[in-house]
Image (cartoon, rainbow, N blue to C red):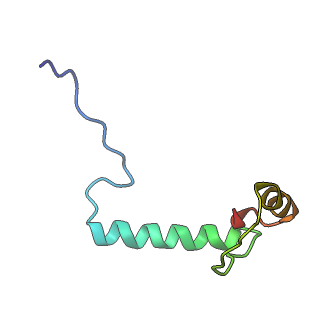
Amino acid sequence: MKIVGTRRRTDLAAGLAPETALRRAALLQAQAERLNPYPRPRGFVFKARTWEDYARWRRAQSNPRLW
């Protein structure tokens, strides 16, 4: 096997401990949630009788996080 060059390392994740990377990811996710105009929906189950009913319900939703 021939290897040319070295493997590229990203500056953001280089040398981070897993705990630090997890903390950074949680902070980034929290910031993204604050920027999102749609609230996080509560968990629920939608049961439609037919695929057409489901499609009609889905089109009527204004929050794209529901599907």
Rendered-image quadrant of the C terminus: bottom right
Residue lying at the far top of the rendered structure: 2
Q: Name the residue located 17 percent from the left edge and 22 percent from the top edge.
A: 3
The answer to whether residue 56 is left or right of residue 4 is: right
The answer to whether residue 51 is left or right of residue 29 is: right
Q: Nearer the viewer, residue 47 or 15?
A: 47
The answer to whether residue 54 is left or right of residue 17 is: right
The answer to whether residue 17 is left or right of residue 66 is: left
Residue 67 to residue 9: above or below: below
Q: Nearer the viewer, residue 16 or 66?
A: 66
The answer to which quarter of the image holds residue 54 is bottom right
Image coordinates of residue 13 in percent, x first then y, are 34, 55
Q: Nearer the viewer, residue 31 or 47?
A: 47
Q: Name the residue located 66 percent from the left edge and 79 percent from the top edge.
A: 44
Rendered-image quadrant of the N terminus: top left
Residue lying at the far front of the rendered structure: 49
Residue 33 to residue 6: above or below: below
- Tell me how many marks there are: 0
Q: Name the residue located 36 percent from the left edge and 49 percent from the top edge.
A: 11
Image coordinates of residue 48 in percent, x first then y, are 75, 67
The answer to which quarter of the image holds residue 5 is top left
Q: Name the residue located 76 percent from the left edge and 65 percent from the top edge.
A: 49
Image coordinates of residue 63 in percent, x first then y, are 78, 67
Residue lying at the far bottom of the rendered structure: 42
Q: Nearer the viewer, residue 41 or 9?
A: 41
The answer to which quarter of the image holds residue 39 is bottom right
